[in-house]
Each structure stands twice: as C-alpha cells, then as structure tokens.
Amino acid sequence: MTKINQHFMQLPGNYLFSEVARRVEAFSREHPDRDLLRLGIGDVTRPLAPAVTAAMHRAVDEMGSAESFRGYGPEQGYAFLREAVARWDYQTRGTAISPEEIFISDGAKSDCGNIGDIFGVDNRAAVCDPVYPVYADTSAMAGRAGRYDLRRGRWDRLIYLPCTAENGFLPALPEEPADLIYLCFPNNPTGAAAGRDYLKGWVDYANSRGAVILYDSAYEAFITAPDIPHSIFEIDGARTCAIEFRSFSKTAGFTGTRCAYTVVPQALERDGVSLHRLWRRRQATKFNGVSYVVQRGAEAVYTPQGQTQIQENIRFYQENARTIRKGLAAAGLTAWGGENAPYVWAKTPGDMGSWDFFDLLLRQAGVVVTPGAGFGPGGEGYIRLTAFGSAGDTARAMERIRAALT
Amino acid sequence: MTKINQHFMQLPGNYLFSEVARRVEAFSREHPDRDLLRLGIGDVTRPLAPAVTAAMHRAVDEMGSAESFRGYGPEQGYAFLREAVARWDYQTRGTAISPEEIFISDGAKSDCGNIGDIFGVDNRAAVCDPVYPVYADTSAMAGRAGRYDLRRGRWDRLIYLPCTAENGFLPALPEEPADLIYLCFPNNPTGAAAGRDYLKGWVDYANSRGAVILYDSAYEAFITAPDIPHSIFEIDGARTCAIEFRSFSKTAGFTGTRCAYTVVPQALERDGVSLHRLWRRRQATKFNGVSYVVQRGAEAVYTPQGQTQIQENIRFYQENARTIRKGLAAAGLTAWGGENAPYVWAKTPGDMGSWDFFDLLLRQAGVVVTPGAGFGPGGEGYIRLTAFGSAGDTARAMERIRAALT
C-alpha cells in the first residue's frame, strides 16, 4: 500500500493569495459595478523589453531551422548566459563569481524549494516572520518544519526571526542554533534592505557555526542606495557559507517568461562535501535545463540596449513606490520599504487586524492589498502594497485610500 | 552545523552519458581525423515544426506589448494547453481525462523526479532492469532506495523487474510487494512496447495492493501498431492507480524548448488523500509554471498543420529505426525494439560485455552507441541505438558496423 508524504497534511489550508482572490471575487459578485485597483500580488505589468523580444525571435528562428536547431542544452544552463550573469551581475561589481558557479533555472521559487533536496531532513531552518511562504512551506514538505500549530500560526521545528518596526525589519541572530537560514533582501514582504555590516553579522554567524545562508535577492534591481549590497557575495566570507537565488522575474519582467539562477560557490562545503557538486547532481538528475529561446532572451537583458530598456521599467516601478509612500503618508499611515524595494509595508490604523484592514480598503476604497498576517503572525497589523501596477492606477488607489481614511 | 543529504553520497559516481562522452573525447583526441557517427544519446535533430515556431513568434510579440503582456501564469499550466492535451491526447482516443487532471511542466524528467515529493520515504519502489537512470537515482536521493551495492550495481531497497529477451523485455509482476512502480512504455532503453492485456495485469496488481504506477509514456508518438495503448489510462481501472508522464520532447522536437505534462486523475487516492490535490499543492509551492511562449508553441502541436508537420518528423525517425534494424541484421546482430519506439536494443556478439562492444564500435566503426550496462546490470550484453540522427548518418553508421563485424 502506497503511503503519502504525511508532512503535506500539516500544511495550512488556504494559500494566502487564494484567500485574497476568494474575498475579492465575493465582493465583486456583490458589487459588480465597483472597479477595483489591485496593489496586492507582486506581478509585473510592463511588457518585455524590445531587446529581449528581438533575441527571442532570433532564437525561435534558429529552432525552426535544421542547421541551427538545438536539442537538449546543458542542465546547468548555456555558457553564454552563465558568462553574462557572472560578468555583469558579479564581476563588474567586484564580486568574484565564476560562470561555473551559476545554475540557470526556470524560477527562484523552484530553486528556493528544490534546494532542500541536498540537505539532511534533521537540519533546523530559520525563517523571518513575516516571511515569503515558500521557504516555510517547502521546509515543511520535506519534514524539516515539524508540526504546525494552527493557533499560533507557527511550525514547531522552524526558528522564527522576528522582523518588527523596532528592529527596522532586520531580524537579530537567533538564540537557538540554526543550520539553514533563509534571508531575503530587499525583503518580501517588508521592503527592508540590508546594509553591509548587518549582512556581515549573518555571514560571521554562519561561518562560525557551519550554517548555510539561503539568500534570496530577487529584488536587488530595485536597490537605489549605493551602500546596500546587491549580493550576499559582496560580503567577505560569504563564499564559504551562502547560496544565492536571483531571478529575471522582477528585474526584466520575466514572471511569465521564466528564468532565474542560483549561485553555489565552489568553495562551499559541509560534512566535507561540496554543496556545488551536490546541487549539480540534483539538477542533472531532476531537471533538464531552461528553454533555449528563454535563455537567449535573458542574455539580451545584459546588452546595452537591454540594460537601458529594463532600467526604464525599474524606474517606472520605483516611481510607483514613491507614489505609494506619499499617498500612505497623506492618508495618515506609517509605512516602510519602497525605497530599495518594490514593496511598501504599512501599519494598519490603530490596532486593526490586517484582514480587517484588507476588508476595509476593499469595501471603502475598492483597493486590493495583501494582509500582512498572510505572511505569518509577525505580519499581523500590517499590509503590503506593491509598486508593479500602472502609474495611473497606483495614483488613483492612493487617492481613494486617502479619501476613505481621512 | 548544516548536514547534507547523505543519500546523495550513495549515488554511483559516473553518470552514464558522462562516461560515454569521456571515452568519445579520449578517442577523438587520439584520432582527430576520424569522423564519428553518433547513435548514442536520445536527442532529436529535426527542427521545430513551422506551426510551432509561428505560434512562438506570435507569443513573443504578445509579451512585448503592454496590452497583451502576460505575467505569472497558472502553476498548473494555461487552460488553452490543458484543454488541447485533454482533447487530442485523451478524449479523441476515448479516454476520459479532463483538463483539470493535467499539469503542464518543463519536462518529464523533472516530473518523474519531483513526483517522489508527495510520497512517504518508506514506500518500496520497483524499477525495470535495465532502466532509465532517473527513476532509480531520484528514488535514491529521497532515501527510498536504501544502500547502493557497487559490486552488484543495485540498490538494496529497490525492487528490480528483470527485462530479458526471454520475457520479451516485458517484466513479470514482482514477488516482493511494491508500492511505487515505475513503468516506461514504449520502453527506454529496450524499445519494447506493452500490449493491453499486459498493462491490465499491472493495473489489477496496483489496484489490488493499493500501489501506484508511475507510467512514463514519453515515446507514445512512435507507436505504429493499432493494438498498443498510447496511455495507461486506456486500461480499465488505471484512474485509481496510475500517474502518467508525457512530453513534447520526442513527439514534437521540444528537447531544447522544454514542455511536458503529467496526468494525475482526480479519482486517485492513497491513505484517504487525493494525490491530485497533493501534486497540485507541490507544484503551486515549488514551481511557477512554464513559459507562456513555450506553452503557445506546444498548443500549436495540436493544430492540423502542427499535426501534419510533426507526423512527418516522426515518420522520418521511424524510417531511421527501420534502417537500424535492417543494418543490425545484415551485420549478424540480434535486435529488438524500433518498431513502436525510437530505440533499438541489440545483443552484443558472443559473450562480449557492453562496454567492450561500445569500444569496439567506436574504434573499428567510428560509431557511438550506448552500452546497455549503463542502464543497470540487466543491460549487460546489450547496446542501445537511437533513431534520432539524420538519415544519411544512420545509413552510413549501419554500413560501417556491418563492415566492422563481417
């Protein structure tokens, strides 16, 4: 008799965005005339850059001709893309990452989840609270999170790192010893960015204890401050304790095109074994590479035209973030983030719960946000807004929120 | 201190195709003037069909325009593709599979590996011998295969199903009780195809014991005999015991374009839990869907033009398979497969080992094949040849083999 993976049965029922969608749909059914402005889900809206679509068209033509057709590519990704990544995302910033250390994939979500395959089940994982749900849920699926306490909204074997207004949403080192540490900066959902000294503290912690930092820098393109590192590998010592996840999703509008990469330094070992080698084995056995056409599109992101075009999109979203920050201040709300990140994190008025405030904004302003409590108990009393909408909708949403609250 | 997944340390060192590549490279260095003909790796060579590239061009244009841009798609795949699959691959063949039961993915290799996530580690898995290495290696990574016995070339917790010339490469039901049963028909590497009565035996076995069949039908497009099922779901009772993996790789030349799908029937339950629901949860948490452009390309495979064009490619490869079968007979070798499959499985002459015969063909004929022993101990004494080359190279390779052996 086949046994299921019982760890799945511990996963809490409603995925955050499904519950948001359910409430929005119910409201729309009751009020079919009300138009809604969506600042909830973190999905981009600007089209692919012309340099990217041109490269993809060329690649499609190559695939349609016998002379230039490509079959299976390398599981780790084509050298042309790994070389562009190493050069432009690392070496030109003074970070010594080689093309061999880069693994091209279909998404940072896949990699953040699959990376668990190479680690023992008995490791203790630490996650921020609030947190992007994938780190906790995939740890749980592997049996690394223990049991879920519905009342507390927490897994009993995960170590939670409280991110609060008091600590500027930069959590302190844990008191319990952690083996795997999921960090995401610029942060989803709080929009907090981490400075060099702060990250150095984590790197030293990980090296001294033999822990591994799983560093998600999917939003690094939104960093504006010159002293904020774009990569954990800008920190001395990170090559012996960190794995980094990056994505073209938010940088270049690839949420529907699917390309990302993971950096596993060759110097990174645990139990005397190269984690680079383990991840290569995992990918060679359970993955077959990213579409050639997509890899050519990602390569074009690094051309001069590509860079000019995607920077224009990033600036567009950054302007939205400023509109949100200003609008929330005008509405009398306290907010963080949005300066080096596409996310703005706002306190609910008074002691209002985040789902209550979600409902209030939906009903009275016709604006969809994400309730902070959906990212964990530490998000209670907050909402998340995203800068990925159109400029007009973003401005209108802020005007409506101001009108509803003042 | 972070612990690695020790199960990885049990994996045998050399991946089959790396060792083949190493030997070929060494030979080419010694004999730079010799041109080699490659009938080893199962990769296609014909370009994408014009209907497919046209659809991909249109999709790239959509992604480049703000009005038609698409961000995150559904993790399970777009309805347009799931509906085309359900209709043309199942319903028109009289098999009641609905679009909701189909999960679009980046590859059957990914799915065959990742499916293990939803099952308990303590299940006993059964694999054919010889076998496509991914089933065994991914079972091992999850801790389901036990320890590897280097001398015997076997995992001590896997149940091996011997595929021999005596049983026509259609293995008998196992004596030890199996929970997860990996079957692949038409088979890689032996090229054997399974009839209806034979598959009914497996379905009855699985239903009576509560086992689950993991059915890889990546090569179904090569079936020519009218009585050979294309899907396990053509067998009564399969909806309550089987998961099926399919791919556009060999059907439509998508090895470098990346698209596949997995069918998990809604009626399939174990431990009182829907496996469909578990897989949906797994994919929603650890996967973010396939590139929109690629899904539009796959959809075009089902158009009348797409069908005409890919059938032409399939017939081309089938003709190669016939050339191989005839060539091997002329060289005095006994062979199987190649009639409902792109693979031909040949006995080595006398008692020659498969790596020795590999070396002989490389050195004396300049032809690269795959040694059967690389697929497991049951493959010793055989080689695999693939029909995916050009017609000219395939004919020349057969001529050279005949000359070397006669």
Image: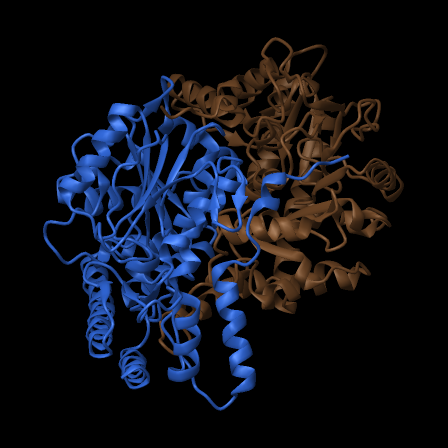
Chain colours: A brown, B blue
Q: Is residue B154 visible?
A: yes
Residue A352 appears in which quarter of the rendering? top right
Question: From the viewer's perspective, is residue B71 above or below residue B333?
Answer: above
Residue B395 appears in which quarter of the rendering? bottom left
Residue shown at the point (77%, 47%) measured from the top left: A232
Residue shown at the point (25%, 41%) measured from the top left: B172
Question: From the viewer's perspective, is residue A365 above or below residue A104?
Answer: above
Rendered location of residue B368, percent (x, y): 40, 74
Q: Residue furthest right?
A: A197
Rendered location of residue A148, percent (x, y): 59, 16
Rendered location of residue A210, percent (x, y): 80, 38
Q: Residue furthest bottom?
A: B33
Q: Is residue B129 left or right of residue B149?
A: left
Question: From the viewer's perspective, is residue A92 above or below residue B166?
Answer: below
The quadrant in which the C terminus of chain B is found is: bottom left
Q: Is residue B111 left or right of residue B224?
A: right
Q: Is residue B87 left or right of residue A313?
A: left
Residue shown at the point (63%, 49%) measured from the top left: A278
Number of marks in the image? 0
Foreground of the two, B153 or A137: B153
Q: Is residue A98 left or right of residue B177?
A: right
Question: From the viewer's perspective, is residue B258 above or below residue A56?
Answer: above
Rendered location of residue B218, percent (x, y): 31, 52
The quadrant in which the N terminus of chain B is found is: top right
Foreground of the two, B159 or A78: B159
Q: Is residue B290 visible?
A: no
Foreground of the two, B370 or A264: B370
Foreground of the two, A238 or B72: A238
